């Protein structure tokens, strides 16, 4: 059992560290809990990522000792290791229960049914959640109930409640299952009181508007009719069978421990949050110890010689189908993000995409986004979406482009680092002093070139390997949302952003000589040679800036 538990923990640590170090996390949860743990040990009661008091969030006292260890070893590494160890070590109490039921074979089947569940790969690799750490005290508590050990049950319930307040529902069921009714009632009442304090006192006073509680259950109170329809969707009707299949459906026969998993499954079933019914959801993870024990009892009831191996095989097959997580490795995006992160001062406030936040979590202020503007000293914009709509008019009207356009058009942010698809802005500086202003090549008269609009004229084009450098002169500031038509014909179909999309035309001043480079296809290169390449301006709506502007003008080689 020791080898299986340690191998499971080691593999989970490897996956989670690879994902974190290569900046492959897709959610903000790791950053959220890292900032929460770091903030608790540094006296911060306000959590900036979601913008709420810590008492209005999940009650997770376990984050305090983890945050204290993070001062020495780093908060994110401590969280990832603690989470992986908690799941790996949970194999021991389950193996002990399995050995009481069916000897060594039962011990192996129970441990395997837990540590190779398909839920654990994504849940452990993608992020950190205190509910996942609760797998260990829940497993201890189940073993304590089975052994009739009141002291062990009490300490286990303390561990469960220190992970997440809503897991008090699990603790209540465990208390009610305990053979000594007097002790069991005390445990259940204590857990119920803990949950009641959070629901009736802390959440109403400190809870954020539109927080996770409202996201999960807001529709239950707002629109009961719609909520009933929501319950009878296919994904919810198939949820329980989908969860039980990796356990070979055996938990159905182990009903005692299935009651322990029931509150978790019920909450997930009722939740309106779209991912709670996914097999990979971390909301399912705390139910795994109870499901494994219920499956073990079900296997014993059926006949342990065949059912116990079937239990282990079902878990392995399910993991192979749905639980594998690729071992992430550093790529071009990773390198680009690391260069941007290295340019941000250690204690400065940051607003950045969610997948970057875990690497800047140990500071007073960090925010998701943008939008909105959280007045951070440094802002990171992710321009990777532009590749999906490259050279099309759609790019000007994507959901992301207006947001980026707004930030680049501001007169109080300067670009300090451009790395891959990432742009780092510093608040309080002029954009004409930043890297985007490299498009400005000098000053000159405004009445030269061929007018594209009242604000910009084309002077000519310079051939370069595989591209053309357009030299333009500004007559004044241009609208922020303009793009450049480039190609052949009176109305070229291809649309590009001016100045690589990193310098806003709003910041142009009369007399600015600017250069905009554009990659050309072989057909467009040939058109350039023949003098048939044409360019023009358009706004995000597809129209010209003014009705009198030319649709396009020819590009003459300088």
Image (spheres, grey):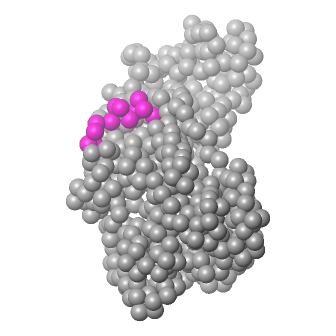
Q: Is residue 26 above or below residue 463?
A: below
Q: Quadrant of residue 350?
A: top left
Q: Is residue 382 visible?
A: no
- The residue located at (40%, 74%) in the rendering is 152
Residue drawn at the location 62% of the way across and 41% of the way down? 326
Residue at image coords 27%, 48%: 71
Give whichever of 16, 152 is nearer the camera: 152
Q: Nearer the viewer, residue 322 or 204?
A: 322
Height in image: 263 above or below 546?
Answer: below
What segment carries the magenta color? 337-351
Where does the image place residue 521, in percent across and percent down from the top left? Answer: 71, 18
In the rendered image, the quadrant that contains the C terminus is top right
For the point 73% across and 26% down, which residue is it? Answer: 490
Residue with the most extreme front position: 103
Q: Position of residue 111 (x, y in %)?
A: 59, 60
Q: Per the image, is 386 magenta? A: no
Residue 338 in picture, x, y percent from top left:
42, 32
Q: Quadrant of the N terminus?
A: bottom right
In the rendered structure, the answer to whether residue 335 lies left or right of residue 548 reads left
**Relative to 102, does residue 75 appear above or below in the rendering?**
above
Q: Residue furthest bottom?
A: 182
């Amino acid at each position: 059992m020791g080898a299986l538990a340690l191998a499971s923990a080691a593999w989970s640590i490897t996956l989670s560290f690879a994902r974190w170090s290569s900046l492959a996390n897709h959610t903000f949860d790791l950053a959220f809990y890292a900032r929460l743990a770091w903030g608790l040990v540094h006296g911060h009661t306000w959590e900036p990522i979601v913008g709420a008091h810590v008492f209005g969030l999940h009650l997770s006292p376990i984050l305090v000792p983890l945050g204290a260890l993070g001062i020495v070893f780093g908060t994110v590494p401590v969280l990832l290791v603690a989470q992986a160890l908690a799941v790996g070590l949970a194999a021991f109490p389950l193996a002990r229960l399995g050995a009481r039921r069916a000897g060594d074979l039962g011990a192996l089947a129970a441990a395997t049914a837990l540590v190779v569940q398909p839920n654990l790969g994504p849940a452990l690799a993608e992020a950190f959640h205190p509910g996942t750490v609760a797998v260990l005290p829940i497993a201890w508590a189940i073993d304590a109930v089975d052994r009739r050990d009141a002291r062990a049950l009490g300490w286990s319930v303390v561990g469960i409640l220190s992970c997440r307040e809503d897991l008090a529902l699990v603790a209540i069921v465990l208390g009610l299952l305990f053979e000594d009714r007097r002790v069991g009632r005390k445990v259940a009442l204590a857990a119920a009181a803990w949950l009641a304090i959070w629901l009736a006192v802390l959440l109403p006073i400190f809870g954020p508007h539109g927080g996770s509680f409202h996201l999960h259950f807001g529709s239950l109170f707002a629109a009961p009719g719609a909520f009933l329809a929501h319950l009878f969707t296919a994904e919810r009707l198939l949820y329980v069978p989908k969860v039980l299949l990796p356990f070979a459906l055996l938990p159905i026969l182990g009903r005692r421990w299935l009651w322990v998993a029931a509150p978790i499954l019920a909450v997930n079933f009722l939740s309106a949050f779209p991912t709670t019914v996914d097999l990979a959801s971390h909301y399912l993870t705390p139910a795994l110890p109870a499901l494994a024990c219920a499956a073990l009892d079900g296997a014993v009831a059926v006949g342990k010689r065949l059912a116990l191996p079937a239990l282990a095989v079902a878990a392995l097959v399910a993991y192979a189908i749905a639980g594998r997580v690729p071992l992430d490795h550093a790529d071009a995006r990773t390198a680009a993000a690391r260069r941007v992160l290295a340019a941000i001062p250690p204690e400065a406030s940051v607003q950045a995409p969610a997948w970057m936040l875990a690497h800047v979590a140990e500071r007073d202020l960090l925010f998701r986004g943008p939008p909105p503007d959280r007045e951070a000293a440094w802002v990171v914009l992710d321009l990777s979406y532009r590749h999906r709509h490259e050279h099309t008019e759609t790019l000007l009207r994507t959901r992301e482009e207006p947001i980026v356009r707004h930030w680049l058009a501001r007169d109080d942010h300067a670009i300090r680092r451009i790395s891959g698809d990432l742009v780092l802005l510093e608040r309080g500086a002029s954009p004409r002093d930043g890297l985007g202003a490299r498009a400005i090549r000098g000053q000159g008269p405004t009445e030269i070139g061929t007018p594209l609009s009242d604000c910009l004229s084309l002077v000519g084009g310079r051939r370069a390997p595989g591209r053309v450098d357009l030299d333009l002169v500004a007559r004044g500031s241009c609208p922020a949302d303009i793009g450049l038509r480039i190609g052949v014909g009176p109305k070229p179909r291809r649309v590009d952003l001016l100045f690589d999309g990193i310098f806003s035309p709003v910041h142009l001043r009369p007399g600015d000589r600017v250069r905009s480079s554009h990659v050309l296809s072989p057909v467009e290169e040939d058109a350039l040679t023949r003098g048939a390449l044409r360019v023009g301006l358009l706004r995000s709506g597809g129209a010209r800036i003014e009705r009198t502007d030319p649709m396009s003008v020819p590009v003459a080689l300088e």
